[in-house]
Every structure is written in C-alpha cells, then in structure tokens.
C-alpha cells in the first residue's frame, strides 16, 4: 500500500512526507526515521527505489535526534480561545457579528489597560472563542506562520456575501474543493471528500477559511463556530509529537494536499473529534489545531498579530521555558 500511494509522486519526497529524512548521495539513499517506522517504511522504499535506479542499503539508516517533551496534561488540554491583536475592536467585532452571528460575550480592558472583547457564541457550550485586544499598529502579518481561523457555517454563500459589507475582503469565493484520501484515519486511495469553502479576511487582515459543515448522517446544518486554528510548521513530525506528549492531544487526521498543493496537514486536538480536511464535521463543537507543513519550507518566524492560544486543564504548572516547536505563543490557565 505505501508503494502504491507513492507511484504518482517522487518516491523520496513521499517518504519524507512520512517523517523520514531521506539523504541521497552517490547513488545511495540513507533514511533517518524513528525505529518503529522502519518496519513498514523499508520494504516499500526498497521496492520503489528499485524502479528509480537507486540503491538502498537497508541497514544504513540514521536514528532521529532525541526528543524529550515534558507532559503537562495527561487528559488533554482544552483550547479555550485564540487572541488576536487588532487596531479597531469595534470594527472587527462587527465583522464577526455580521458574518457569523457571533456576539460580544465580555468587554473591558486587559491588566495593562488595553481594550479587549471576547467574541463567540455563548449558546454553544465548549465552542472556541476569539479574544480581541486593541493595540496600535497591530494586525495580521502574512510573513508569520499563523494562517488564521477556520469557521464552520451552515451556508458558505451567505457568510461570504456578508464579508465585504462588514469590512472584510474576499480572497477566494465559494467553491467546492475535492480533497484526496487521508492516511490517518486510513481511507481507500480513490476516496475524495468534496468541501464547499471560501477564504476571506476580517478588517484586521486575519484570514478565515469558511467551510460548510453538516451532519453526514442527518444532513442537518450546524451553527457557525470557530472550529480550527491553522498554523504553519517547520518539522511536522516534531510538532505532532510535541502536541501529543506535552499537551496530551490526539492526532485526528493526516492529510496530503498533493497535487493541489505541495503540503500536508496534520490535525490535532484534545478530544477524539470527527474531522474532515478543513476541521470538525457535523455538530461537534470542539476546536482543533491544524499543522500545515509546506515542502522545503524555511524555519517559521513569528511576525506578530497572533497574541496567544489559551489552554485550560494543566495537571501542573508548566516548566519554565516551555516552548512550542515553532514558538507560537501559548497561555496556560
């Protein structure tokens, strides 16, 4: 099965996608992978590379560097809110109210006197909230790794039509995107998942992937909720392991975007939530984090705008210096 999936793309690139470091030199290939991966990596790799005219020495693999993560939550932390720094709270809050029906749940100021507002849907228990903090000169910065929110809606067309009148911009109009099979959970190779989606930005410039969600059994549409946080990462396997071992989260989906885009997306979350390519499906309200790795990307550099991801449920105080692999700001409550 691994070799069958790889026939349509470069084999070395395929195995790199699966967490192996592949080094090609002098007609030979060396593979760096976790020991438990080698049992299924090597047979398919040898078969594929034989067709590529390359020589694989199956004993010539390099153990990965040691990864030591400190667990701070055995049961899985809950993602409560995401903090955006904006220049005009009223304008941005008005956008989310007009497009998605959200409301201002809390107001006031931060401890250092900055205006703040908590945006969300109070009628939906456990839904992720957006915290806006007003700060001069702050806005989304495209050269950082933060890719914005995903919002699941009952009707993409209605939501995207409301974007411009409420101060937003349309980056990509409503369209049905066909996603291929996921490798986790494993789906047959010919599986496709069509998703009706669009991309807009709020008045602060933060991107929002808007996708249509429904319960696949009853075909009942759901209320709009912030369903996912989208982060670019430099080493997807290291990030996946960090979220699992440090935060107690689960890998929920592993999705390749080839050939549509040279990237993969690993979805992680604190609850065993049913997710599709863009985030949770049906009426599940638990939010997830989607880690996108773009092939051959440089290290991620934080460029501001994103204030923090706020999590609850730690078993003990996080150790001093705890750091998300790509330095995304985290707050533990």
Image (spheres, rainbow, N blue to C red):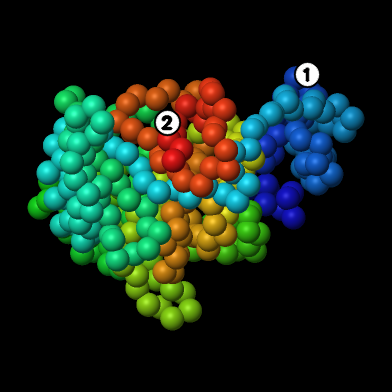
The residue under the point 43% across, 81% down is 218
Q: Residue furthest left?
A: 165
Quarter residue 28 falls in: top right
The residue under the point 63% across, 62% down is 187
The residue under the point 41% across, 41% down is 310
Which mark is on residue 156?
Answer: none
Q: Is residue 52 left or right of residue 316?
A: right
Q: Secondary structure at mark 1?
A: loop
Quadrant including the C terminus = top left
Pointer 1 residue: 26
Camera-nearest label, 2 or 1: 2
- Between 255 and 141, the one lying in front of the other is 141
Q: Residue furthest top?
A: 26
**Rendered position, 80 above or below 160:** above
- Between 21 and 78, the one lying in front of the other is 78
**Rendered position, 231 above or below 281:** above
Pointer 2 residue: 329
**Rendered position, 216 above or below 93:** below
Residue 48 image position (x, y, % from top left): 77, 42
Q: Secondary structure at mark 2?
A: loop
Ranked by sequence position, the earlier of labels 2 and 1 is 1
Q: Is residue 278 left or right of residue 94?
A: right
Quarter residue 205 falls in: top left
Q: Residue furthest right?
A: 59
Report, in whole angstroms, how far the alpha carbon at label 2 lies from the one at label 1. Answer: 43 Å
- Between 106 and 102, the one lying in front of the other is 106
Residue 300 image position (x, y, % from top left): 46, 26
Q: Which class describes the residues within 10 Å of circle 2: few (<14), some (14-19), or many (20+)?
A: some
Q: Report whether residue 251 is seen.
A: no
The residue under the point 87% across, 33% down is 58
Q: Report whether residue 277 is seen.
A: yes
Residue 9 image position (x, y, % from top left): 62, 43
């Amino acid at each position: 099965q691994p070799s069958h999936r790889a026939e349509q793309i470069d084999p070395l690139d395929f195995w790199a996608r699966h967490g192996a470091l592949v080094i090609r030199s002098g007609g030979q290939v060396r593979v760096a992978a976790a020991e438990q991966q080698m049992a299924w990596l090597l047979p398919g790799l040898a078969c594929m590379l034989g067709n590529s005219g390359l020589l694989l020495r199956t004993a010539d693999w390099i153990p990965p560097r040691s990864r030591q993560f400190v667990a701070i939550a055995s049961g899985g932390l809950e993602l409560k809110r995401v903090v955006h720094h904006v220049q005009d709270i009223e304008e941005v809050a008005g956008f989310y109210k007009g497009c998605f029906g959200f409301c201002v749940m809390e107001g006031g100021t931060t401890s250092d006197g900055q205006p703040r507002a908590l945006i969300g849907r109070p009628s939906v228990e456990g839904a992720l909230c957006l915290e806006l903090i007003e700060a001069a000169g702050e806005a989304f910065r495209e050269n950082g790794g933060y890719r914005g929110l995903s919002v699941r809606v009952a009707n993409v067309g209605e939501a995207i039509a409301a974007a411009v009148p409420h101060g937003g911009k349309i980056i990509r109009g409503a369209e049905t995107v066909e996603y291929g099979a996921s490798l986790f959970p494993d789906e047959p190779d010919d599986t496709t998942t069509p998703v009706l989606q669009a991309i807009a930005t709020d008045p602060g410039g933060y991107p929002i992937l808007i996708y249509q969600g429904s319960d696949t059994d009853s075909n009942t549409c759901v209320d709009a909720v912030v369903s996912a946080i989208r982060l670019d990462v430099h080493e997807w396997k290291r990030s996946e392991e960090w979220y699992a071992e440090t935060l107690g989260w689960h890998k929920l989906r592993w999705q390749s975007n080839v050939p549509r885009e040279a990237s993969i997306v690993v979805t992680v979350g604190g609850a065993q939530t049913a997710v599709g390519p863009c985030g949770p499906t049906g009426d599940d309200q638990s939010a997830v984090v989607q880690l996108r790795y773009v092939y051959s990307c440089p290290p991620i550099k934080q460029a501001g705008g994103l204030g923090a991801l706020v999590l609850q449920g730690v078993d003990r105080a996080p150790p001093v210096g705890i750091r998300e692999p790509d330095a995304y700001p985290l707050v533990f409550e």
